[in-house]
């Protein structure tokens, strides 16, 4: 029998949970929350609407918790015009942008400003993006090297670090042991960067957000909630 699929929603308190519903030849009802916060529900063909709604209401707190967890990794970058006087973040601090014409292309922090020296035909945006990426790789690598010894008892090898621009994630890890970080994370405070890296390293031990995962994260970084909140509230 072919799969049927539609979009439905339920109200839970002040929240509306929208989900993609499909029916398959299976015995149990499954619910998954994805990094983009989408919810997919797979139900047996004979599931009644009453049973479906009851199960979703039962699981609603868990669904919302998972969505909030993923949202903490969603970059909140407002549009930038790359003009003089505009503020840009670096390691949690605001810097005013200063763009000047020059014979060479260069980006540097100078007297509390983010100075972009550029040739006439060069984009300030591209220069700044490349500068952020270079700074990100250096700082992330140093932080990774500093935090990996905290996982010594789990005999984890130092993972390969990759920098990749991601629309909805600050970081991720692969089953092959690679840690992938968003270069935009370099705009966050150092503690928030460390939190994201520790979060991904914890996933090398516990692959899902289980109690054991959070217990390990708490043991490694007791103040992780503070830095997670700073990340969520930063206009990065």
Image (cartoon, helix red, strand yellow):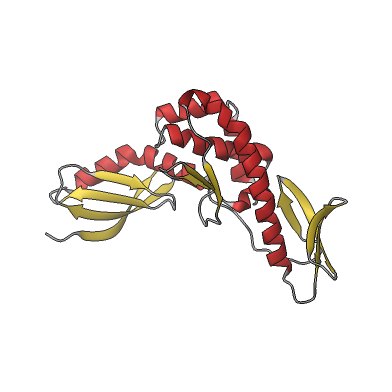
Q: Residue at x 50, y 36 (%)?
A: 201
Residue 162 position within the rendered picture, expressed as x and y whole percent measured from the top left: 55, 50
Q: Nearer the viewer, residue 72 or 101?
A: 101
From this viewpoint, is residue 66 visible? yes
Work out whether 232 lies above or below 6: above
Question: Where's residue 226, x and y in %?
Answer: 61, 33
Displayed quadrant of residue 86: bottom right
**Residue 225 to residue 140: above or below:** above
* Residue 62, quarter of the rendered image: top left
Residue 195 image-quadrant placement: top right
* Camera-nearest residue between 165 and 231: 165
Figure quadrant of the N terminus? bottom left
Picture residue at 55% right of the left edge, 55% below the top? 164
In this view, the residue farthest toward the bottom is 121
* Residue at 62%, 45% in the rendered image: 233
Q: Is residue 149 above or below residue 37?
A: above
Q: Position of residue 114 (x, y in %)?
A: 80, 56
- Camera-nearest residue between 68 and 134: 134
Residue 234 percent across, percent down from the top left: 65, 47
């Amino acid at each position: 029998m072919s799969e049927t699929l539609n979009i439905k929603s339920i109200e839970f308190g002040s929240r509306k949970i929208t989900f993609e519903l499909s029916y398959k030849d299976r015995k149990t009802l499954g619910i998954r929350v994805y990094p983009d916060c989408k919810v997919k529900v797979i139900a047996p063909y004979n599931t009644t609407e009453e049973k479906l709604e009851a199960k979703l209401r039962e699981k609603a707190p868990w669904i919302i918790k998972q969505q909030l967890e993923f949202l903490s990794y969603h970059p909140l970058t407002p549009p930038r015009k790359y003009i003089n006087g505009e503020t840009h973040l670096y390691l949690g601090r605001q810097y005013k942008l200063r763009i000047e014409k020059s014979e060479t292309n260069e980006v540097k922090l100078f007297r509390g400003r983010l100075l972009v020296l550029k040739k006439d035909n060069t984009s300030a945006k591209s220069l700044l993006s490349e500068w952020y990426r270079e700074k990100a790789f250096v700082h992330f690598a140093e932080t990774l090297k500093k935090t990996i010894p905290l996982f010594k008892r789990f005999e984890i090898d130092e993972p390969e670090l990759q920098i990749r621009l991601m629309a909805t994630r600050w970081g991720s890890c692969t089953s092959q042991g690679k840690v992938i970080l968003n270069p935009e994370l370099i705009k966050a405070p150092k503690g928030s960067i460390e939190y994201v890296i520790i979060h991904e390293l914890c996933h090398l031990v516990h692959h899902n957000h289980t109690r054991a995962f959070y217990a390990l994260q708490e043991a490694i970084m007791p103040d992780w909630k503070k830095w997670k909140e700073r990340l969520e509230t930063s206009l990065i």
